[in-house]
Amino acid sequence: MYSLIRPFLFKLEAEKAHLLTLKALHYLPAGLFQHIPSTKPITAMGLTFNHPIGLAAGLDKNGAHLDALSKLGFSFIEVGTVTPRPQVGNPKPRLFRLPTHEAIINRMGFNNEGVDALITNIQQSQYHGILGINIGKNKDTSLNDAVNDYLTCLQKVYRYASYVTINISSPNTPDLRQLQQHEYLSDLLKQLAEKQKELADTHQRYVPLVIKISPDEEDEILKQIANTVIENKIDGIIATNTTCSRAGIESTSLSQEQGGLSGKPLLKRSTACIKLLKEVVGSEVTLIGAGGISDTASAQEKLAAGANLLQVYTGLIYQGPYLIPGILKRLV
């Protein structure tokens, strides 16, 4: 069915098609795509996942479509990125499809309605599955003050989240990736871990913390990040966010567009990052593989590299909602 609808959607401007699809999902009958092959449950970060495949942040930035997305059979859903205050993001157009490469370039810029709106949407939803909430800093918040934005969001979302993702790797917020440097990262994670402990005591419930990293760092920097994660007892790493590299898409004119590249061209590098991180963290830290998953082979590749869980986004845009059962049916 999706193969019939996709040509129509792809004639629309990408961001309009995105919003139209999310709205349409609300009208689909529950269970339409939920014939999920049985797999062995996965325990990670103290949570039990029905299978390894979840939805990456970015598709539902404000948590307004949880009930609709829950129909697609994900074992977990991550919403956001959300910031303390609402912001409009970067000027449009800011989302570009590259169908030949099954890729997307985006420079959205953390457009969202703010953390309070996200919480209201979550409260109004009927979703009771595993929920990740991805948090970031506002564009006009300096790097020195960034920790306060993350602490504000963590405090507000804690009671609603199954886990919280610290997004320090979007290429579309100026200087954000500098937070991956040790001089910032060590203090950021230390303060977040302290707040996590405080909130766990207050709510009598432990909510894991995860950081989302860039694929564009040198291997030595990735190792340093991994060690800082271990030192601060952070629970997980999402590897990876989008890339600024244009390797593999040089032939298309859209390669000149600024923003983060996701989809198939990201597969090899993101998987290499997982393998490297696994060598450092072993079983101490949960690794969530993201980047270029479009079929069983690419999913298996990430699991073999050391990922405990997986996230999809761009693959869903190109393959449609049967992607999840299709992968799981053949997953070893």
Image (tube, grey):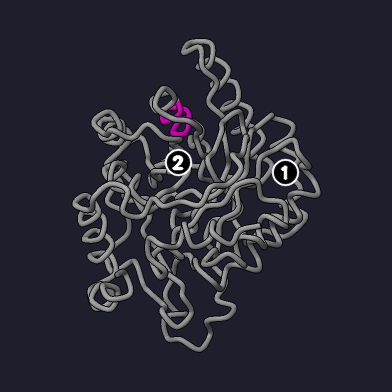
Residue 230 is inside the magenta segment:
no
Quarter occupied by the N terminus = bottom left
Mark 1 element type: helix
Q: Callout 1: few (<14), some (14-19), or many (20+) C-alpha neighbours within 10 Å? A: many
Q: Is 59 left or right of 255, judged from the image as shown?
A: left
Type of secondary structure dominating the magenta stretch: helix
- As drawn, the residue found furthest toward the bottom would be 251
User: Disc 1 residue type?
Assistant: Ala
Neighbour class for label 2 at 10 Å: few (<14), some, many (≥20)?
A: many
Q: How many marks?
A: 2
Q: Amino acid at mark 2?
A: Asn
The residue lying toward the viewer, choosing from 187 and 211, is 211
Report the span colored magenta: 148-154
Give the distance between the C-alpha atoms of the residues marked 1 and 2, in whole angstroms: 19 Å
Q: Position of residue 332 (x, y in %)?
A: 66, 57
Find residue 93 and report its horizontal and vertical position in percent. 28, 69
Residue ID for mark 2? 134
Taking 167 as reference, is 216 left or right?
right
Q: Which residue is mark 1?
A: 226
Residue 240 quadrant = bottom right
Q: What residue lies at 50% left-to-right and 52% top-to-bottom?
A: 37
Q: Identify the residue at horizontal 53%, vertical 61% (top origin).
A: 327
Query: Residue at 59% across / 20% down in the picture?
Result: 194
User: Is 151 colored magenta in this rendering?
Assistant: yes
